[in-house]
Amino acid sequence: MERLRPDAASGLPRRGRPVRRAATILLLALPAAASGGEPWHGMWAADPAWCAYAGLIGSHDPAPVEFSAGRIRGLETDCRVTGVATDRDFAFHVVTSECSGEGMTWRQVDVLMMAGDGAMWRWTGGGEPIRLVRCEGG
């Protein structure tokens, strides 16, 4: 049986270097994730004028939609995010959530596709995707 010798620089067995690289990459990514750094997080609106009503989400029509790691809030709709699958190569995120509004509850799947111009496309499974723009400060 081969005896693994520790690497002089890291103290890890030589075969442990890929694990060390993966851990380093993960640690470098943590500050962005901890600060809410996902590109789909923030306040988004189909019409930039709706951003003026950001403080009235849920009670004013029209208003933007707020996306965060744990919640999606919109007009008379509040969703608790239950899962996120991300494909960074193609810049899209599949966000599953449990929603409630107007006395009903339902499961929702949002496909959020980041556009090259800073916009985001939102598709909920029916019809055409909706183009959203980020609200200032959101």
Image (cartoon, rainbow, N blue to C red):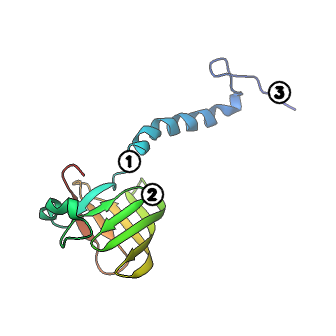
Q: Is residue 18 above or below residue 44?
A: above
Distance of label 3 from label 2 (alpha carbons):
39 Å
Q: In what element is the residue under mark 1?
A: loop
Residue 60: x percent and y percent? 19, 70
Q: Amino acid at mark 3?
A: Arg
Q: Is residue 28 above or below residue 53?
A: above
Q: Quadrant of the N terminus?
A: top right
Q: In what element is the residue under mark 2?
A: strand
The residue beneath circle 3 is: 3
- Which residue shows up at 44% across the image and 65% down it? 80
The residue beneath circle 1 is: 36
Q: In what element is the residue under mark 3?
A: loop
Q: Nearer the viewer, mark 1 or mark 3?
A: 1
Q: Amino acid at mark 1?
A: Gly
The residue beneath circle 2 is: 86
Between residues 62 and 88, which one lies in front from this camera angle? 62
- Which residue shows up at 38% across the image and 47% down it? 36
Mark 1 neighbour density, 10 Å: few (under 14) some (14–19) many (20 or more) = some
